Amino acid sequence: MGRLKALSRRQLELQKSHRSRVLKKQLLDACSIHDYQTTRKQARKLGTTLLFHDSNTYMEWKQSRTACTLAYSGALGSGKTVLLANIVDDLYLQQDSTTRVAYFFCRYDSPASMTARTILGCLARQLIQDHPDINALITDIDPDNPLSIDHVSALIEKVSTMPIHFVLDGFDDCSPVTQQDLVSSLQNLQRSIPLLVCIATRVQGDIFINTGAPSIHHLSAHMPIPNPDIDVYISNEVKEQLNLGNLIVRDDRLVEIIKTTLRSQANGMFLWVQLQIVCLSCMENDHDMREALKDLPSGLSETYCRLLKRHDKSRYRRLLFELILVTLEPLTLTQLEHALSVEPGNTLYNPAKLLNCIDKVIRSCAGMVLVDEEEETARFVHQSARQFLMSPAYDKQIDEYKAQTTMAEIVLTYLNYSLFETRITARRPATALTIGKLPAAMLKEMMPSGFKLLQRLKSSTSKSIEPDTVGSRPLSSAEFKGYAEAYWDIHLTYVQPSALCMKLLNEAITKQRLNLHVAHNLLTSIKRAMDNRGTQLLSVLLKQDLDDEDRKKAFKHAAQLNDTDVIDVVVEHYLNHGTEYILVEAITNDCPAMWKALLKYDPVLNQPKFEFNASYEAMGRLTPLMFAVQSRSFRMIETLLECPGVCRSQKSEIMQLTPLEFAVARGSSRAVRLLTSGFIFREWKDHESLWDTALRTFMQATNAKRSAKQFEIIQILVDNGCYNTYFTPDWRPEKAPYGRTPLMAAAENGLHSVVKLLLDFDDSNVNAQLRCWIPLQTGGTMVGPVHVGQPARPPNIITMYQETAWELARTPEIKSLLEQHGGRFGPRRAG
């Protein structure tokens, strides 16, 4: 028996542990699923620096126990990213049980990484990772609703019990809106927790200083010019390229000239140095190198121009630039080979057109595209390269809109390939990378050696080309298909889809190439189309079948965006569901724009013959105005009140309450204020019912807070003219439940202003007493109070009169006020 109990306890412990792990993963994923680690690892591999070790400013920031911001400023390519990557290492090495460390490195080629929500979400994830009590944090998590920035910030505050060092790189690459949102959120956190932020920027961190947060300590540091690390970097880089055979010179004295010239003109820019060495290595003799050294370009744009002119062109180079420019995540070499081989519009897959080796195309990019040795992905060497290609400085300037259109056409063409059921054995050599060792103690901020790619080309052995064959295994997501399936809809929303795009999209949907009805894929694509205002794509997607739950989510998402064009498309599509259906969604989501779109497509609504005052089944047998009150849709209340024929005094079929009475009964002071605005109470046909509802609800309040809220409603009615004319006598003591008058309720709950209002109106019953029944045959035991509307007292029952309002008063001030109107103790008596 004991063994069974032990096994049972063990089983329960395992179940509890499993549930805890599941909850933790749900919470971490709710914060962010973005891969924040890889980018920092890549930056750390670029080099080592100890610049910050001897910095008093850095040590002051590092040792601070209160909120503080340190901003490192420097020019493009000056080593800021590598510096921050090394700072993260230093913080981790020095971390103890009294501090926490977190970081985020933005990627200019990853739009998802450059949003305030992603950055704060990753900060929260790192802090929550080791938090001991996950159950205390997950109570408010809703799987259907992503966490907002405010919710994420609240989580960060909740888990932050010690100083947090947060290193943020790439701030300048974010949009101005994102920068402002991020600064606002971080400084709000700094006001409540000891958050120590370290950022890299080109503008001395002014945005952090000039945002109205004087209580937060701000520090600044500059990348030194000349940078003491640049000499080591130049020497090691030149030596490495000589050893690799990429840089070839006949005169050994030229090597020293190269080093000296680069040192004198570098101005602390490591990227500039790297690109000059790439350019020099393309030259075929010492004379050309010497001439080039006499006239080195002063900036990065001129450097890029010279590089592209000196390298052999490839007919795929421009297309490669375009794809890398607009890709939503770094593409692998294999994915790029497939994408570059696509002929937009031709859905017949021809493996003979697949690139044999993408290395030649990358080499033609003259060091502006680099390959990550771990992920085998291609990206621009630096954000400046991306900007250059889209600027007039490039004689073949790339238009981002056209590049997006090209990508959309390639993606849709690829998805429409008829041979996706089988695997294509491509005629291509292996693309394994051969990477030389990284030199130690040097800064390489924006790119590993551009010549490692050349080394890889030279060291690769020739491969035999197999004949075209078709296998039987399905194409895997390792090829371009995985990317195409994940992002086709986003690329389509970035442009006004071309005729070819729409043709390919309809074909893909017809042939079920997009798997729209798997795991809410259709809803996800619809939301993406809404987010990017892709109305043409949205129109196509809405023609597919959404289940009821997803349809409601789509309406909710459109209402939250509140974009007129998006809402027009949604409303027009669902007109066939009926006016009542869309009206329910407009009210539920408090979206006047949805209502206005409905008016545009259904002009009958503007005419008095539409039954605004009828009760609708879909609204719980309420009128539209009452349904808006119930839904707390205050903007829709205002909108409906402007419609012709809407009656505020029309009672619903089931509840027999007017919208105003309904709002009073629900205790919605805001709705009452809206419904009484501009209303003439002399025209009210059933004023007694309104006051009956108002006072009854007030009297039923269970605490002072609710009583005060209900009195606010009474005050609104009074302020709008209902008090003087129609404060009815129906609440005299003999009519009140238990004999408990509004005056008693106000006095007992300590509501001085309510007591004064009631006494000023009528103080004739100031000394009314509570009542209860006592049956004679039970020997005088009290059995209950008199109820409102009781026609007559039962036989053998007597009524006992008890406390007055003066006796029930909570405060001396109220007692004094009652005494001024004759309030006093009530004698106990039977009647």
Image (cartoon, helix red, strand yellow):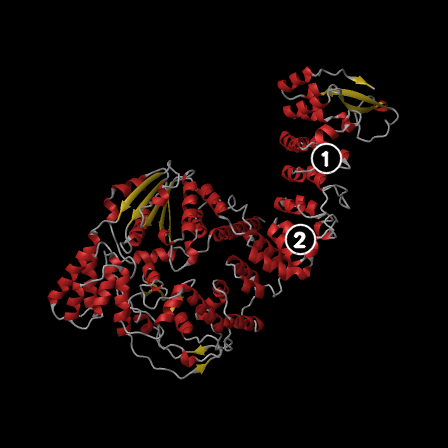
Earlier along the polypeptide chain: callout 2 or callout 1?
A: 2
**Residue 591 seen in the figure:** no
Decide: marks 2, 1 in contact (CB < 8 A)? no
Residue 537: x and y in percent read 54, 64
In the rendered image of this protein, does residue 403 appear above or below residue 778?
below
Residue 380: x and y in percent read 34, 63
Q: Is residue 805 left or right of residue 252?
A: right
Q: State the image quarter where residue 650 is shown.
A: top right
Which amino acid type is shown beneath numbered disc 1? Phe
Which amino acid type is shown beneath numbered disc 2? Leu
The residue shown at (40%, 84%) is: 467
Task: Bin the neighbour count of mark 2 within 10 Å (Cα to Cα): few under 14, some 14-19, many 20 and up.
Answer: many
Residue 646: x and y in percent read 71, 46
Residue furthest to the bottom: 467
Q: Give the quarter of the figure containing the C terminus.
A: top right
Task: Bin the neighbour count of mark 1 within 10 Å (Cα to Cα): few under 14, some 14-19, many 20 and up.
Answer: some
CA separation in Å, label 2 and label 1: 29 Å
Q: State the image quarter where residue 774 is shown.
A: top right
The front one of 599 and 274 is: 599
Residue position marked by numbered label 1 in the rendering: 681
Q: State the image quarter where residue 829 is shown.
A: top right
What mark, if any, has residue 583 been given in the picture?
A: 2
